[in-house]
Image: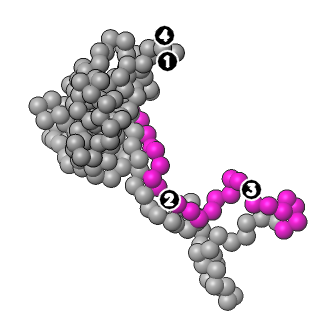
């Protein structure tokens, strides 16, 4: 990836372009993200940088985290993520990545954890049809038949069943950066991004 930064989803609002067109945007508090560790080809076999985001209160940080961040000369961070940047070798430990690495009009991919929906049935989770309400049937929202009884005598692993819905890592690709507010560390991205308000997201250059 060319460029990337960690951020926090603030919420959604709207912007008006110069021609009067209204566009929906998601506000992301992006950075500042200090470089905590460098990965090199000589030591780890690949090039990458480990960055931190969101300072952690002193009482909430354990000793290993404090020592790891203190070695880089930064405060303990709540989130630590590894970014395989194209120019990872040019970054130095302690250097801070800010939101102005992106410019207005650039295209980005945003990765986050989707909202959790809890345990859901087949109809909501997989959009399956309900049972027929005729001839005395009371099987309206159940899974129904799961397979033959003799052969193969088992339920295949790919069978769509009720279960936990949401809380999955989701990437929305090719979104437009509508505005960059470097003074307040904000990125305004056109459209919706995954996750609830206050959750961490990764903004990176699009692959498309």
Q: Are marks 2 and 3 in contact (CB under 8 Å)?
A: no
Residue 161 appears left or right of 185: right
SS under mark 3: loop
Q: Residue at x 63, y 62 (%)?
A: 161
Question: Which residue is identified by label 2?
Answer: 165
Q: Is residue 132 above or below residue 117?
A: below
Q: Is residue 41 above or below residue 192?
A: above
Q: Using the numbered discs, state the Cα–Cα distance from disc 4 to disc 2 in whole angstroms.
A: 42 Å
SS under mark 1: loop
In the image, 69 versus 112, the foreground residue is 69
Q: The magenta stretch spans which residues?
A: 149-175
Q: Using the numbered discs, state the Cα–Cα distance from disc 3 to disc 4 in whole angstroms.
A: 45 Å
In the image, 12 versus 5, the foreground residue is 5
**Closer to the N terminus: mark 2 or mark 1?**
1
Q: Is residue 171 above or below residue 124?
A: above
Question: Which residue is identified by label 1?
Answer: 44
Image quadrant where one finds the N terminus: top left
Q: Using the numbered discs, state the Cα–Cα distance from disc 2 to disc 1 in whole angstroms.
A: 36 Å
Task: Name the image quarter holding residue 9.
Answer: top left
Q: Are marks 2 and 1 in contact (CB under 8 Å)?
A: no
Question: Which residue is identified by label 4?
Answer: 42
Question: Which residue is identified by label 3?
Answer: 156
Q: Using the numbered discs, state the Cα–Cα distance from disc 1 to disc 4 in whole angstroms.
A: 6 Å
- Whether residue 27 appears in this view of the structure is no
Give the residue at the far right of this rendering. 150
Residue 15 appears left or right of 191: left
Q: Residue at x 68, y 57 (%)?
A: 159
SS under mark 4: loop
Q: Residues within 10 Å of mark 2 (few under 14, many from 20)?
A: some
SS under mark 2: strand
């Amino acid at each position: 990836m060319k460029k990337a930064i960690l951020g926090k989803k603030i919420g959604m609002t709207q912007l008006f372009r110069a021609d009067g067109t209204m566009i929906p945007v998601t506000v992301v508090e992006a950075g500042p993200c200090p470089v905590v560790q460098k990965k090199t080809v000589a030591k780890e076999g690949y090039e990458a940088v480990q960055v931190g985001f969101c300072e952690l209160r002193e009482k909430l940080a354990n000793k290993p985290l404090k020592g790891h961040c203190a070695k880089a000369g930064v405060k303990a961070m709540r989130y630590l993520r590894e970014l395989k940047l194209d120019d990872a070798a040019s970054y130095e430990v302690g250097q801070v990545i800010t939101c102005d690495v992106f410019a207005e009009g650039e295209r980005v991919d945003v990765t986050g954890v989707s909202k959790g929906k809890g345990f859901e049935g087949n109809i909501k989770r997989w959009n399956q049809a309900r049972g027929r309400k005729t001839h005395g049937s009371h099987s309206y929202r159940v899974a129904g038949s799961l397979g033959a009884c003799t052969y193969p005598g088992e339920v295949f692993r790919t069978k769509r069943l009720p279960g936990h819905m949401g809380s999955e890592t989701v990437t929305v690709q090719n979104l437009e950066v509508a505005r960059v507010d470097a003074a307040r560390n904000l990125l305004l991205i056109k459209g919706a991004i995954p996750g609830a308000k206050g959750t961490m997201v990764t903004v990176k250059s699009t692959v498309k």
